[in-house]
Image (tube, rainbow, N blue to C red):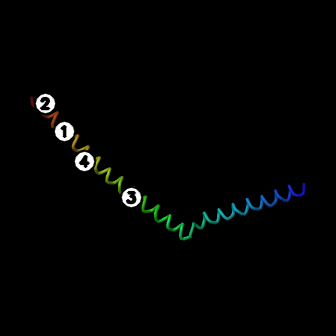
Amino acid sequence: MVAIIFGGLVLGLVVIGSTILIAIKMLRGDLSREGQRLKGEEARTLQEIYQGLDRMEKRMEALETIVFDRERRANGHEKNE
């Protein structure tokens, strides 16, 4: 019975302590070299995604222009006939 109570107290202290450590790491940020490397890679990946989306947007605008010009020409030829 004493072992169960003692084990429960130790487990509770471990859970509370680890929760506090996680909270401190979240507030302070991960300053380790590995954490900095991962943040750098994440930033580069996000920049690549943003640049890719920007290029895709420009391509879509160009395609819309081509399609609308073709529609205008097609409608213009029908009206003139």
Mark 1 surroundings: few (<14), some (14-19) or many (≥20) residues within 10 A: few
Are the residues tagged 3 and 4 within 8 Å (C-beta)? no
Label 2 is placed on what type of residue? Lys
Q: Give the percent coordinates (x, y) of residue 1.
A: 90, 54
Q: Secondary structure at mark 4?
A: helix
Q: Which mark is residue 70?
A: 1
Q: Amino acid at mark 3?
A: Glu
Label 1 secondary element: helix
Give how far apart the Cα atoms at labels 1 and 2 are: 14 Å
**Tally of numbered tags:** 4
Q: Residue furthest front?
A: 3
The residue at which mark 2 appears reads as 79
The answer to whether 36 appears left or right of 44 in the picture is right
How far is mark 3 from mark 2, CA to CA?
46 Å
Q: Secondary structure at mark 2?
A: helix
Image position of 69 with respect to 18: above or below: above
- Left or right of residue 53, residue 17 in this image: right
Q: Residue furthest right?
A: 1
Measured along the vertical axis of the image, is residue 71 above or below residue 26?
A: above
The reply to whether the C-beta atoms of the residues labelled 3 and 1 are less than 8 Å apart is: no
Q: Select label 4 or label 2 by which is in front.
A: 4
Note whether 45 is above or below 79 in the view shown: below
Identify the disc placed on residue 62. Answer: 4
Q: Earlier in the sequence, mark 3 or mark 2?
A: 3
As drawn, the label of residue 48 is 3
* Callout in the foreground (3, 1): 3
> Which comes before the other along the chain, label 1 or label 2?
1
| Amino acid of disc 1 | Arg
Residue 34 is situated, as x and y percent measured from the top left of the image, at: 54, 67
Q: Residues within 10 Å of mark 2 (few under 14, many from 20)?
A: few
Task: Tell me the mark number nearer the camera, choosing from 3 and 2.
Answer: 3
